Image (cartoon, rainbow, N blue to C red):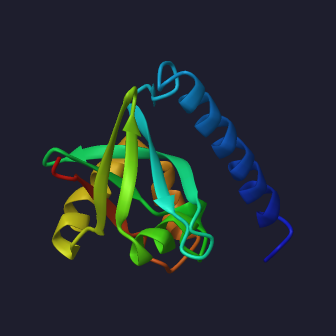
């Protein structure tokens, strides 16, 4: 990895942790959205550690389900949370003050084709991220578990 890329991911990690902490402390108030962008907290079970891992992610709604994108800022390696849901798709989601259990799945090719332009419209940075790697960013759909 080149030295120029390291600080970007380190800064992203710090900002993500701060965002997550504020989101949890404020129960989503003031930090769950900015402009036309909305954020949720996604909690997964670590595939090796078995510990709960929580990350804030930009999301869009699609057919009543939140969808997130596994971009990791254009890294050629997928984010850890994606590896976690591939091992165990059971997740916890917090949107604002509401928290619920769900199941995560990778969007089908057709769904991804429909969702990708919506993500780019919401946050144009995704288009730039995609130019940094040949990895196609998976889009993850989260379905609420039956209660």
Q: Residue at x 35, y 50 (%)?
A: 119
> Could you tell me residue 129's position as x and y percent?
54, 61
Quarter assignment of residue 25: top right
Where 86 falls versus 57 (above or below)? below
> Could you tell me residue 77's position as x and y percent?
59, 76
Where 103 falls versus 55 (above or below)? below
Q: Residue at x 81, y 57 (%)?
A: 7
> Could you tell me residue 88's position as x and y percent?
40, 72
19 displayed left or right of 145: right
Q: Residue at x 78, y 77 (%)?
A: 1
Quarter assignment of residue 133: bottom right
> Could you tell me residue 127's position as x and y percent?
46, 58
Front residue of this view, candidates 44 and 1: 44
Quarter assignment of residue 137: bottom left
As drawn, which residue projects farthest toward the bottom? Answer: 134
Q: Residue at x 55, y 31 (%)?
A: 24
Where 104 falls versus 17 (above or below)? below
As drawn, which residue projects farthest toward the right? Answer: 3
Where 5 falls versus 11 (above or below)? below
Count of labels in the image: 0
143 displayed left or right of 5: left
Front residue of this view, candidates 105 and 6: 105
128 displayed left or right of 139: right
Front residue of this view, candidates 124 and 65: 65
């Amino acid at each position: 990895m080149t030295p120029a890329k390291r600080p970007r991911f380190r800064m992203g990690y710090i900002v993500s942790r701060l965002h997550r902490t504020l989101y949890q402390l404020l129960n989503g108030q003031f930090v769950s959205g900015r402009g036309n962008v909305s954020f949720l907290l996604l909690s997964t079970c670590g595939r090796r550690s078995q510990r709960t891992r929580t990350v804030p992610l930009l999301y869009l709604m699609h057919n009543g389900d939140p969808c997130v994108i596994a971009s990791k800022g254009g890294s050629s390696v997928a984010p850890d949370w994606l590896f976690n849901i591939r091992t165990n798709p059971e997740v916890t989601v917090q949107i604002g003050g509401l928290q619920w259990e769900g199941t995560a799945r990778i969007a089908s090719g057709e769904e991804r084709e429909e969702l990708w332009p919506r993500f780019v419209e919401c946050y144009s940075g995704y288009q730039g991220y995609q130019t940094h790697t040949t990895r196609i960013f998976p889009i993850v759909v989260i379905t609420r578990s039956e209660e």
